[in-house]
């Protein structure tokens, strides 16, 4: 991933409020389309211009060809706030993040964790993140629903990893059961992505706990009950289960690895 800086210059008198609303609207549109990563963006004002540093999946993530209708409209609305089209300054590659994948995968997986800011749609051949804007828009012209699902999944993951409150157990249920609202929404999104891309797309079902390693090895697919989903060898060194009928991958409980 890459770090870039945007500069928004004023071409006429404006107000902080008008500029703030216009810039934040643009950033939110880019975020909803997967063109910028993260949740919070510090916009600084100095010497008559606004600056913001952003994390991008690729160097050219802000190219006009990737913009959603919302982003294009937000760019036009900068003029109403008396702001010029932002100038971009490349800062460098982020050494703490993964490289995005633009190759066509043989399969895909919806996978994230609370430490990942990248796209939750991963190339099933190498687990590298696929920029969302390179996929057909899932709903209403962008990928806002995928971003919202990812935010909720990560919130649950952070709660269960902290293991400090009773909320841990409710969060774990959301992450690891096929009856949860989080699974239902994510699995439906998975289906939508598969329909649009024509590429088999799977959902990662988190697994922790259990009674013994043997019980884990004997697990059946929690959605269809198939006992044939256990793999002879782990897939990508982390998935020991894969149900092609239900499009689910999972792991042996982390307690027994």
Image (tube, grey):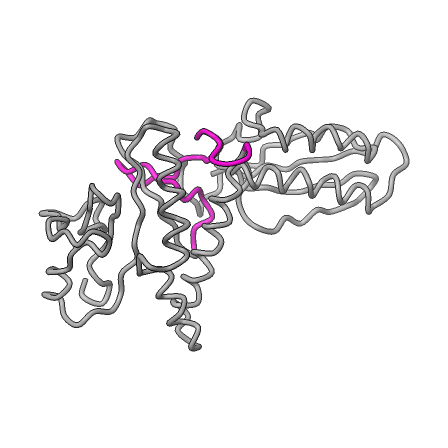
Q: Nearer the viewer, residue 167 or 95?
A: 167
Of all residues, the one furthest to the right in this rendering is: 13
Q: Position of residue 215 (x, y in %)?
A: 12, 66
Q: Nearer the viewer, residue 16 or 134?
A: 134
Q: Relative to 76, is 181 on the left or the right? A: left
Name the chief secondary structure element in magenta.
Answer: loop
Q: Residue at x 17, y 54 (%)?
A: 225
Q: Position of residue 251 (x, y in %)?
A: 22, 55
Q: Relative to 71, is 239 on the left or the right? A: left
* Magenta stretch, residue numbers: 115-141
- Eyeballing the image, is 139 above or below 67? below
Q: Position of residue 42 (x, y in %)?
A: 67, 49
Picture quadrant where residue 191 is located? top left
Q: Residue at x 38, y 40 (%)?
A: 121
Q: Residue at x 65, y 30 (%)?
A: 88
Q: Quadrant of the C terminus?
A: bottom left
Residue 195 painted magenta: no
Of all residues, the one furthest to the top in this rendering is: 65
Residue 136 painted magenta: yes
Q: Relative to 21, is 59 on the left or the right? A: left
Q: Residue at x 58, y 36 (%)?
A: 91
- Eyeballing the image, is 250 above or below 174? above
């Amino acid at each position: 991933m890459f770090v870039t800086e945007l500069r928004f210059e004023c071409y006429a008198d404006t107000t902080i409020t008008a500029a703030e609303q216009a810039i934040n609207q643009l950033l939110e549109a880019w975020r909803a389309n997967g063109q910028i990563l993260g949740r919070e963006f510090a916009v600084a004002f100095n010497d008559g211009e606004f600056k913001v540093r952003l994390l991008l999946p690729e160097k050219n993530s802000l190219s006009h060809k990737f913009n959603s209708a919302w982003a294009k409209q937000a760019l036009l609305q900068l003029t109403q706030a008396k702001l010029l089209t932002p100038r971009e300054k490349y800062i460098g590659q982020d050494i703490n993040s993964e490289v995005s994948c633009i190759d066509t995968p043989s399969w895909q997986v919806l996978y994230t964790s609370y430490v990942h800011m990248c796209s939750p749609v991963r190339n099933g051949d190498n687990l590298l993140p696929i920029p969302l804007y390179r996929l057909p828009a899932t709903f209403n012209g962008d990928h806002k629903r995928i971003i919202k699902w990812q935010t909720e999944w990560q919130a649950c993951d952070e709660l269960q990893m902290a293991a400090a409150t009773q909320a841990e157990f409710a969060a774990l249920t959301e992450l690891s059961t096929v009856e949860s609202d989080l699974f239902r929404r994510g699995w439906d999104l998975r289906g939508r992505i598969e329909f649009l891309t024509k590429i088999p797309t799977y959902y990662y079902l988190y697994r922790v706990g259990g009674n013994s390693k043997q019980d884990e090895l004997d697990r059946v697919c929690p959605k269809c009950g198939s006992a044939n989903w256990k793999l002879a060898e782990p897939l990508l060194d982390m998935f020991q289960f894969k149900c092609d009928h239900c499009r689910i991958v999972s792991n042996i409980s982390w307690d027994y690895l």
